[in-house]
Amino acid sequence: MCGIVGYTGPRDAGPVLLDGLRRLEYRGYDSAGIALVTESGDLFVEKRAGKVAVLQDAMGDHPPRAGIGLGHTRWATHGRPSDLNAHPHSDCTGRITVVHNGIVENFRELRDELKAGGHTLQSETDTEVVAHLVEDAYAGDLADAVRVALARLEGAYALVVLHRDEPERLVGARLNAPLIVGIGAGESFLASDAAAIVAYTKQVIFLADGDVADVTPGGAVITDLSGAVVERKIDIIPWSVEAAEKGGYEHFMLKEIHEQPAALTSAMTGRLRHDSVCLEELDPIRDRLTGIDRVELIACGTAYYASLVGAALFQEWLGVPARSTVASEFRYSPPPINARTLVVAVTQSGETADTIAASRLAGDRGALVISVTNTVGSAITRESHAAVFLQAGPEVAVAATKTFVTQVATLVMLAADVAHHLGRLPAAKEQELVAALRRLPEQAERAIELAATTEEMADRYAEAAGFMYIGRSFGYPAALEGALKIKEISYLHAEGYAAGELKHGPISLLDADVPLVAVATRSAVYEKLISNLMEGKARDARVLAVATEGDTQIEQLATDVLWVPDTLEPLSTILAVIPLQLFAYHVAVKRGRDVDQPRNLAKSVTVE
Ligand code: F6R
């Protein structure tokens, strides 16, 4: 939520910051703003409600030249999206300016105190208090003043602060929200994530909670909140700027759907050994895995749907109770947790506030925590004893696609690895699984080809009043995820339901205007699913089935069929979701929606 970028160095800062903001826009796009210290030493601030393009128009063709500046793209929490509430926010003197991602929870109290002390606050935001606190604390050294101000804040923040009179220096700080420092040749950056700066440098420092970064063109000095210097290593970003560009596709979402075969290959790289699965990341915690007697998966949104597959497999292969819970519920109603509980936190961004808080709670109560994430250096990796990376590359579209399929594949490998090392996965079964995993990228490619029909189908379904998605067993998470894709990007209502539950209520929604989308791939529950499909058909609903190639029966029953290749049941979720992603994409395009940046959403949800 919210994207931050800062630059200090010899380049013209304005274009660098605008470029960074465009690449961070997926984090929030209610409003955007920029602050620059111009060559004549003035502080130039421009901020607008709307997307970065609106800000760019407002700045015109010749924004002032500057060697330092900061920028922000916002997902509103406190204060509606407006020019006034857009970041950056400045102090009373107009010398200090701040951008912020997170929530200052005690901002009302601080506002009252600042107003009583004679400060004038202009906006409705929580962020503005920070600029005024820094103003009060400033005695010639910006980093010192920021540290004093931070001591007053409760909540979460990634902040970048600039003082007009120190025109080579940016001060950044983080607590429960991401911030990285980019180290270039004679230039430095601060950013919410690497996408904003990878065009300029691949060398980054992932700041830890409580870090304050004093950044100049020559590099960065990192301290804790007391001012004591802390050492942080430099990491190298493993992907290039092209990975975060559209590469000829009309939308990032379409590109990322097409990247799924390669993302699956990458997720499996180094993890399949002959006939077995091995995740080296688990080696340091193998001793603790032997005593596990229960598995709890925690996640939000799409990651939660992926985690349902993981829970089913842990339970089946380990023979211990396993379940998945949405992190925001787990936090406030946690199950009994002890040292024999394995908690698996699934999060693409590694930043989702609820998932992080739930993992922390589990860790504090003694659980062994493994995170499954796409983001190296993200906060969740610090809340877990081992981190398993998706290796899917950057995902820019707000609607998750390639990270869903790689989450499922990674959870399958994780459950198989743990079951293997505990001696509970028969060799023949593992051999069969590995063979099926190896076929998966090619099959995903075929699923994409077969789903070419979704473009034409979208014409016939785009005006539906809503959709009902159903599935059973491993088809159920695919149904849930398919429904979420439609909701997110087309703004049509869709229910994802366990097929057996249809008759217990939601069947009343079905009629000629509400199609039934049935995940009916080959499985042990296929016949049961067909009965549910027939129940829908009998209510005049059009039936769109996702089915396994070669299924002759389904053609007689469904109005339309989306074909996918045959695979093992635990992997069927991955292939079944592909046509549903493309169906949602084409429906959204037909309806003229903003596919990559749907309304009201942001990719990383760093607020609770
Ligand atoms: C849906 C989507 C969201 C995320 C959810 C969790 O397309 O992207 O539902 O899955 O916000 O995000 P992560 O995985 O980053 O924790």
Image (spheres, rainbow, N blue to C red):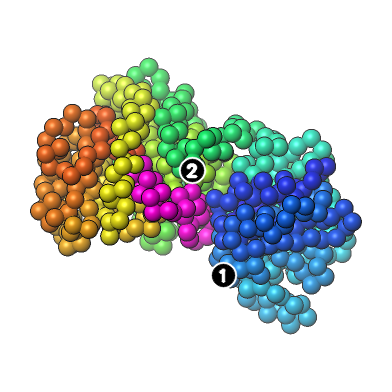
Q: Which corner quadrant holds the N terminus?
A: bottom right
Q: Identify the residue at image location x=75%, y=66%.
A: 90
Vertical order, 150 against 565 (above or below): below
Instruction: Tell me which amino acid carries mark 1.
Output: Arg
**Which residue lies under the disc numbered 2?**
251
Instruction: Indicate whether 467 appears above or below 291.
Output: below
Q: Which range of residues does the magenta coloring cover?
A: 581-608
Does 516 sit left or right of 575 as displayed?
left
In the image, is 441 to the left or to the right of 65? left
Image coords of residue 539 (percent x, y): 12, 56
Task: Label 1: state its secondary structure.
Answer: loop
Q: Residues within 10 Å of mark 1 (few under 14, many from 20)?
A: some
N-term-proximal mark, 2 vs 1 = 1
* Image x and y of residue 475, in percent: 25, 42
Residue 137 in sight here: no
- Per the rendering, the mark at residue 80 is 1
Is residue 582 rendered magenta in the image? yes
Pointer 2 with pointer 1, Cβ within 8 A: no
Front position in the image: 332 or 434: 434
- Could you tell me how far apart the alpha carbons at marks 2 and 1 are, in whole angstroms? 28 Å
Q: Quadrant of residue 162?
A: bottom right
Q: Which secondary structure is most common in the magenta stretch?
A: loop
